[in-house]
Amino acid sequence: MKKLLALILAFVCVISLAACGGKTDNNDKTDTQVTSDSKQTPEPTQKAVSEPLNPTPGSVTIGDVTLTAELVNLDEPMQVSSQSKPCMAVSGDTVYIGNGDKIIKKYTLADNALTLEKEMNISNSNGIAVDGKGQLYADGGVFAAKIYDGEGNQIGEAVESGNISVSQTEDFALTYFTGRDAITKISGGTATPWVISGLRSSDPAQIKGPFTKVAAIEVVGNHALVAGSIENEQKLVAFDTAGNEIARSSEKLFGNGISAMTETENGYMTASVSTIHLIKNDGTFIGKSDSTKSLFGVEEAVWLKKFVPMEDGSVLALCGAKRADDTAEALLYRIKGF
């Protein structure tokens, strides 16, 4: 009887162990599969490469003036975060171009090509200017512009905050920021209100100068260009550095703002994003471009950011242009004909 009972118990244990072993094997296999599956991640999506633009510049006729454009080649394409970001300053054959995001590149210009000399990391570089000493000013907006030597070393700050434009022929600069009461003159290290002030006053008697609102300022040699609202129309007015008016556009300028402007031997050239206006020396309005796509040779409208007159009579024009993937690129042209 005892032998029979022992045999029965032994048989039950064998069956139990077989069952437990099989269950453990299945669990191990399942755990391994779950762990392996959890480690599997999808292949990363490859980002499309941003292809540089390949402009084919041409011409555009405004009134009786035909402008032609030539591409000035950078040593390598400069990608920017948006069309409105690029900025530029020029002194002789030295060209500074910023991407609007802390990087400013210093180039040497020869013919229609730029050779990179130095890359500088400058904190506030939404707009830049250069004076007759070769000192570089990086716009501070509501803060004072920082001043650098030509190698990117900070050497000081402007005595007044705001967007700054500097003469290369005189000790003269103007600063202004949207919403300010006045344009400020900087000369001899001192900041004083210029001839345009009282812009925030509700009393017309307190407003000095022709403007009720200022859109843009640009110092070109010994002249100062100001664009803004005069009797609810956007006009350009040219002054000498003493503040005497020397010319005023006879017709209103297209658009709600001016993104670039300069003076040439033949008059004044301004831009409202992609639209170019031409104005004679006496203020007579020549006309505006219906489109500048043919001039700059790109499919999308550009955003013109800076005009600089050159000794040969041409104008360097910096713009932001949209790429096929909706990123943007800084493009530089030499405009001839005005």
Image (tube, grey):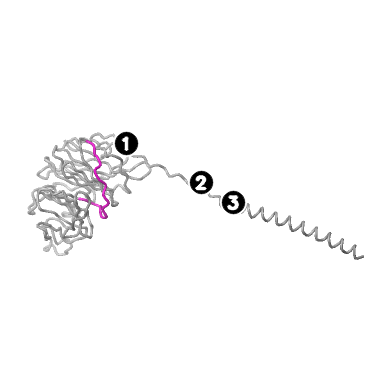
Q: Is 231 positioned to the left or the right of 35 in the image?
A: left
Give the distance between the C-alpha atoms of the residues marked 3 and 1, in whole angstroms: 47 Å
In which image quadrant can residue 1 be found? Answer: bottom right
Magenta stretch: residue 241 in it?
no
User: Mark 2 belongs to which amino acid?
Assistant: Glu
Q: Earlier in the sequence, mark 2 or mark 1?
A: 2
Amino acid found under the numbered disc labelled 3: Asp
Instruction: Tell me the CA gap for discs 2 and 1.
Output: 33 Å
Looking at the rendering, the stretch of residues picked out in magenta corresponds to: 112-128
- Disc 1 residue type (three-letter): Asn
Which comes before the other along the chain, label 3 or label 1? 3
Residue at point 27%, 41% (across, down): 331
Residue 109 position by quadrant: top left
Question: For numbered disc 1, what is the local secondary structure?
Answer: loop
Residue 8 relative to residue 29: left or right: right
Q: Quadrant of residue 309?
A: top left
Q: Which mark is residue 43?
A: 2
In percent of width and height, residue 154 lies at 21, 55
Question: Among all residues in the image, which is located at the extreme right?
Answer: 1
Marks 2 and 3 close (CB-CB < 8 Å): no
- Disc 2 element: loop
Task: Return the mark for residue 295.
Answer: none
Q: What residue is pinned by disc 1?
A: 54
